[in-house]
Image: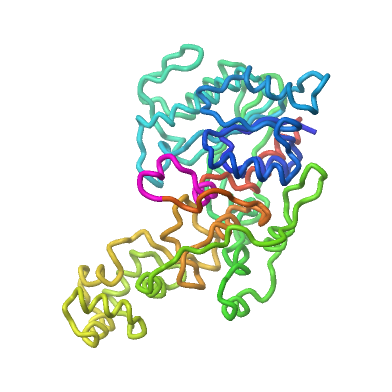
Amino acid sequence: MPYAIDLFCGAGGCSEGLIQAGFHILFSSDISDMVEVTYKHRHEQLGLIQGENTWFERADIKDLTGKDICTHIKNLKIFEGKDMPEIDLMIGGPSCQGFSRAGRRDKADPRNMLFGEYVRVINEIRPKYIVLENVEGFVDMQFIGYKGITGIEYPDGSVTPNILQNELNEIGYDTLEPKILNAADYGVPQRRNRIIFIGYRKGLKAPKYPEPTVQPNEQLSLLDAISDLITDPQIKRKVNKKLSQFQIDSRNGRTPGIDGKPIPVKKQYNTELSRQTEIVKERFELFEQGETGTNLKKRVMEQGIDISDKPALIELCATKLKMTKEEVVSLFKNPGATKEQTEILLTKKNIRQRFSPEQPSATVVTIADDYISPWEPRTFSVREMARCQSFDDSFEFLGKRTTGGLLRRKEVPQYTQVGNAVPPLLARAVALEIKKVL
């Protein structure tokens, strides 16, 4: 069995894919205490026991050395009286907030330098193959005054991929040209582009990037992924007449335990839903399937909308606009409502979107407050988001469900654990290509 190390492991999306591909994870690490609880719990489920056949270390990678990692692996009970095996694969996704195009990009974000620490650990462990995963923004982030681990000073404006490839070359690794992979091409019901770097020790056989396992017209939709998790029994009977193969696989489990058998789900975890006021619920009902907040506002102003069955919204608008309820209904039923009037009805938010059931999910993010179910006027549960990432239903996310305000800078609750994860089926596809050349 090939051996792997998973750094910046998060809740364990990448680890799930590695295990599905047949790798044994000897060591993993992340900085978050919330992540640690989820990760260890899952591995115990699978028979990966701390100190016996695996080791998780909660640490800042800046404080983690190759010597530390080797010591933990050598001390595992499965290697008692034996030499430490060679590491076949090291995989990691350094924190991507500074690179992300979805949020504010910050060239000074210290987390941008973590890929350099990853290269340092690679140099100290010397695995046969390495994989680095990150967001698309990683491709064109520029650095000023970057100094490599061998002392090379890179010219200002050097971009991350060039620095990374050169740094790996300096320590004896060849690399493939980085490639952007869409998770939807590998059986994940989600449009999620990630850049993948693959490196290998000089002299070893070069691997390839995985070919798509599904064609563009065969990509799984939200209907395929989560229609069995609809909460309204009548809607569920109408929409989910038969379980899809993806739903069956999610329930039966894809990730094998140490005994080689996947874990079927006995009850659904992480299905709690956010509470919504009547006003919010009625606003959600105004969205058509697949419609964004921007398009809804345009439709209201240009075509009009019937809100006669939305008493909470009518009451709100009547108070704010100083009109009678009848006048409010008439105002919005016809074209011509002003932007200011429409924003009272809908709020100024444009980021909200009601997902389309016939398409893959949009990229799952760490805050799901503004994503609306196609079938019900509500946001998604952690389990629904995890399904869109291709996690097994038996994978239980622990800790706080969500958080807000400044706590988002340091806490990693369940929604964030899901949103930050590498989709297991994408990780599996990449890991299988590494396994082919081992």
Q: Nearer the viewer, residue 373 or 36?
A: 36
Indicate left or right for 299 with 134 as reference: left
| Percent x, y of residue 415 | 50, 52
The percent position of residue 376, horizontal first and vertical second, equals: 49, 72
Q: Could you say which is closer to the camera, residue 367 or residue 57?
A: 57
| Quadrant of the image occupied by residue 301 | bottom left
Residue at 29% of width from left, 65% of height from top?
A: 347
Outermost residue, bottom side: 326
- Percent position (x, y) of residue 385? 55, 57
What secondary structure characterizes most of the magenta part? helix
> From where the camera sits, is residue 132 visible?
no
Q: Residue at x 41, y 33 (%)?
A: 141
94 is higher (above) or lower (below) than 67: below
Query: Which corner quadrant of the image does residue 406 belong to?
Result: top left
Whole-percent x, y for residue 276 in the image: 41, 68
User: 90 above or below 12?
Assistant: above
The quadrant of the rendering that contains the N terminus is top right
Please give the range of residues in magenta. Answer: 404-419
Q: Residue furthest left?
A: 322
Residue 403 vs residue 158, the one in the foreground? 403
**Does residue 410 show up magenta in the picture?**
yes
Taking 426 as reference, is 91 above or below it?
above
Instruction: Please check the rendered image and state whether residue 29 is part of the magenta-colored stretch, yes or no.
Output: no
Q: How is the image coloured?
A: rainbow
* Left or right of residue 56: residue 350: left
Query: From the image, which quarter does the C terminus lie in?
Result: top right
Q: Quadrant of residue 206?
A: top right
Q: Residue furthest top?
A: 151
